[in-house]
Structures are given as structure tokens and as C-alpha cells.
Amino acid sequence: MTDYEDLFADDDDTAHCQVLVFSGNDEPALKANASALSNHLLNPGVRVELRDLAYTLAERRTHHFHRAFVVKDRTDLDEGAIAYGKKHSSQPKVGFVFTGQGAQWPLIGKEVVEKFPSARAVIKRLDDALQSLPDPPKWSILGK
């Protein structure tokens, strides 16, 4: 049992480490955000709890595409220790584009309704809901 308990004992070196996360719209903005925080923390008038800073950075800031992090046990911030996200070595290849604007083949919905009774039942329920409105449309979903 002693070995098991040792797994959860506080280790003085890591017990108070926190992950500080940063983000930015692009890489220069990300680095500027980290640098601005580093400079702010250098101000002798600034007193902040590390766990509060970690929480605020992780939960109360907008998460942009470009990310970085550092694990710290105190609030001094060494910008060289920050781990920045991976970079693409080349432009990613686009596999497909779905416009969502009806670019698929004509009458796809008709085929689905004809071949799948459950789809037809859903469309029928939707149509019934539309027709039960105070000012129902003159058309029917199934009729279209």
C-alpha cells in the first residue's frame, strides 16, 4: 500500500506547476501576447497567483488558431521556454470542398425519401408541423 500512496504524494518539484496557455490570430500576434504578459509580470507592482493566471489564460481568454504553452512553478516568464504549436512544412492539401449550397446532384432529396421510409416519415412530420401553423404554406415539403 505504501507504493500506491507514494504515487499521489505531493512532489515539491511539480506540486505547484501550472500550464500557461497563449493564443493569437497569427504567429506574430501569439508571440506578442506572450511577450506582453512577460513584460507585465516583470513589473514589481504586479502580484498574481500562478494558479489564477493559469485559469484566466485557459478559461477566460479567446482561443485563437495559433497556440503556445509553458509549464511554470512561478510567475516569472522565460519567453524562450514557451513551446509553440507545430507549423505546416507546406501548404495543406484540400481533399474536398462542400459548399452546402446545393452543389450536389439534382433530386438527391427525392432519392433519399423514395429509398428510405424513415426519411420519408421525418419529412412527413416536418410537413405536418408546417401545415399546423396559423398561416401554413400553400406548398408541401413532400410535393416539392
Image (cartoon, rainbow, N blue to C red):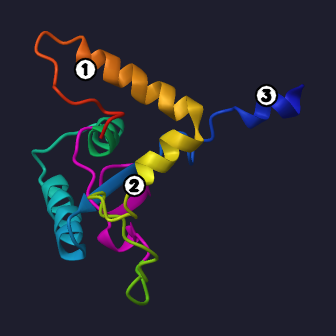
Q: Quadrant of residue 84?
A: bottom left
Q: How many marks?
A: 3
Q: Disc 3 or 1, which lies upstream in sequence?
A: 3
| Res 56 → quadrant | top left
Return the x and y of residue 12 as percentages of the image width and height: 58, 42
Q: Element type at marker 2?
A: loop
Q: Position of residue 21 (x, y in %)?
A: 34, 53
Q: Secondary structure at mark 1?
A: helix
> Which quarter of the image is occupied by the C terminus?
top left
Q: Which residue is mark 2?
A: 107
Location of mark 3 (residue): 5
**Seen in the image, is 21 located left or right of residue 119?**
left
Foreground residue among 133 and 33? 133
Name the spot of residue 60 as percent of width and height, x first.
24, 38
- Residue 116 is left or right of residue 111, and the answer is right
Image location (x, y in percent) of residue 31: 23, 71
**Helix, strand or loop at disc 3?**
helix
The quadrant of the image that shows the N terminus is top right
What's the amino acid at mark 2?
A: Leu
Q: Nearer the viewer, residue 143 or 23?
A: 143
Kind of residue at disc 1: Leu
Q: Is residue 20 visible?
A: yes
Pick the residue in front: 16 or 88: 88
Reading the image, the residue beneath label 1 is 130
User: In this view of the protein, which residue sits in the foreground, 16 or 131?
Assistant: 131
- 3D distance between C-alphas at marks 3 and 2: 65 Å
Point out the stretch of residues depicted in magenta. 60-86
Say which amino acid is labelled 3. Answer: Glu
Mark-to-mark CA distance, 3 and 1: 63 Å
